Amino acid sequence: MSVKNAYDMVVVGSGAAGLTAAITAKKAGLSVVVLEKAPVFGGTTAFSGGVVWIPGNPHYEAEGYTEDREAVHTYMKSEAGNKYDAGFVDAYLDHGPEMLRFLERETEVRFVRTLYPDYHPEEAGGVQIGRSVTAAAYDGRRLGKEFKRLRPPLRTITFMGMMFNSSNNDLKHFFNVTRSPVSAAYVAKRLAVHLTHLARYGRGVQLTSGNALAARLAKSAFDLGIEIVTEASVTELTREGNRVTGVIVTLNGQRRSIAANRGVLLAAGGFARDASRTAAHYPHLQDGGEHFTPVPEGNTGDGIALGEAVGGHMSAGLPNAAAWMPVSKVPYPDGEIAFPHLVDRYKPGFIMVTASGRRFVNESWSYHDVGRAMIEACHGSGKTEAWLIADHRTIRKYGIGFVKPYPMPLGPHLRSGYLRRGRTVPDLARSIGVDPTALADEIRTYNEGARVGEDRQFGRGTSAFNRYLGDANHGPNPNVAPIEHGPFYALRIVMGDLGTFPGLVTDTQARVLDTQGVPIPGLWAAGNDAASIMGGAYPGAGITIGPAMTFGYVAARAIAGQPATEKTK
């Protein structure tokens, strides 16, 4: 690949923010290059669920849903608290739907509706449905020779390399494979097709979720002639006076300068893999706890550091430094990999306890809410961990973490130590270092309500969001069942994340601001390199990718001379 010495726009990072910006700028007539330090493109987006939270999006409007802007403001004000910024919410509401329409009209990107409620749908301004869409499935072979450079999905959330759709309907067939002929046929067909592709291409080609979104964006970029240069590490921004004029990049072991005649966009994924920044921002690390992130290894805060070096500064005071994600550590021959607990906690028959043997949260709240509660519950203990508990009937029906449902065997996971087992509840408690009396008492208390479909401690199943990811075929409560059929099982849970919230302070045109609030000429930021407009909150599915793509789009428009109305955050 021949990289030129100058472009109108240089994009640092190849996730959803960077690729959306690159496509938008190219469509506006600019020359663009995307520089990615990893050997693969797609960024954190390729690992994600591919869900995008866009209030007022056209997919729901077409079905008769009408978004109430004031309701969005009310909900965001409740979620973000004193970090709520009306100007940024307005910019998001203006340009998010516009961005979706543009991509679907002009590129290979396609979205489909989901049934996701907001994460707190009963709060003022929250909705039961209508704000989250997800990338439509995609055939990776359409990328041609570039398919091999697409970041594969996170290994732990595939089955033999097969990806699942970001929908309850897809997963329910796998959970029901031994109980429903329809589900068995569905799964058999999916597996047969996948194994054929695996033999021929070395990986699954039926892409879903974030992998489909990354592939669709990349194919659109390639179709426009945009170069996505991998193994290209940007180490410095060049300047003339106070204006950013380009980058210094290491390519093939050589440092070289690339000019950006219009501007540079930083979209390198935030700092979830930067040990010094996470130590300063993650409260459980300051408390002596452990953190194990599933995000790509390259997310080391490079973009933020580049911005700081030319006068930018990070946001401060957010109540949460990341989108918290409870994870377990799956042992592989080449090391441990994080498994994000996105599904199992919602099913009936699971509870989580701390080392005290006591529950601490409604386990069917969002990963971020459960993670925040876990950090608070473990504060002062010197370790941030919990145990996900279930009985034999439950894990054979739903699996637990990386452990798949029946008929897949439990033995390998028990032998590796990933899964713990006890003949009785006290036996299990002793095997995980929890007080046997406390755990037995907690399960007894939980079971009293669970036998009639109630969670009398934390109210599981009382929210539409809880119920959405529960088991609709289990009554009377899709999230609650007793834990009483031994043997009993436990899985150790530690804290992870899906990406960081603090980032470079920008305005509503995505321009990076200096410490005086003045835009730095020639420099923009989007995605996790920019401060989250959610104020450290997590209101719904897709609140990371939605703003990333929207403000990548806004940045490119501004660089091309089509700026939005200015407002700073």
Image (cartoon, rainbow, N blue to C red):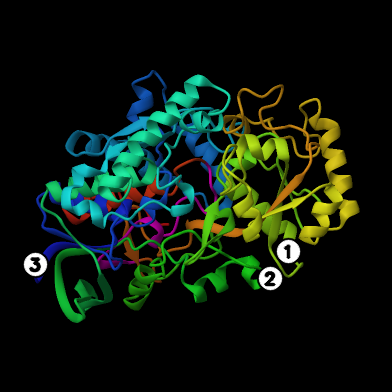
Q: Which residue is mark 1?
A: 379
Residues under numbered marks 1 and 2 in contact, where contact means CB atoms less than 8 Å apart:
yes
244 left or right of 92 in image? left
User: What range of the chain is rendered magenta?
Assistant: 518-539
Circle 3 residues within 10 Å: few <14, some 14–19, many ≥20:
few
Which residue lies under the disc numbered 2? 287
Q: Which mark is residue 47?
A: none
For marks 1 and 3 on the same chain, the one whose residue lies earlier in the sequence: 3
Foreground pick, 540 / 438 = 438
Secondary structure, mark 2, is loop
**Magenta residue check for 274:** no
CA gap between label 1 and label 3 equals 53 Å
Q: Is residue 230 visible?
A: yes
Which three-letter amino acid code belongs to the residue tagged 2?
Answer: Asp
User: Quadrant of the rendered structure where residue 433 is?
Assistant: bottom right
| Structural distance between the alpha carbons of marks 1 and 2 | 7 Å
Q: Residue shown at 25%/52% (left/top)?
A: 19
Left or right: 195 in relation to 49:
left
Element marked by disc 1: loop
Q: Which callout, 1 or 2, points at the residue further toward the start of the chain?
A: 2
Q: Quadrant of the N terminus?
A: bottom left
Which residue does the numbered mark 3 point to in the structure image?
A: 2
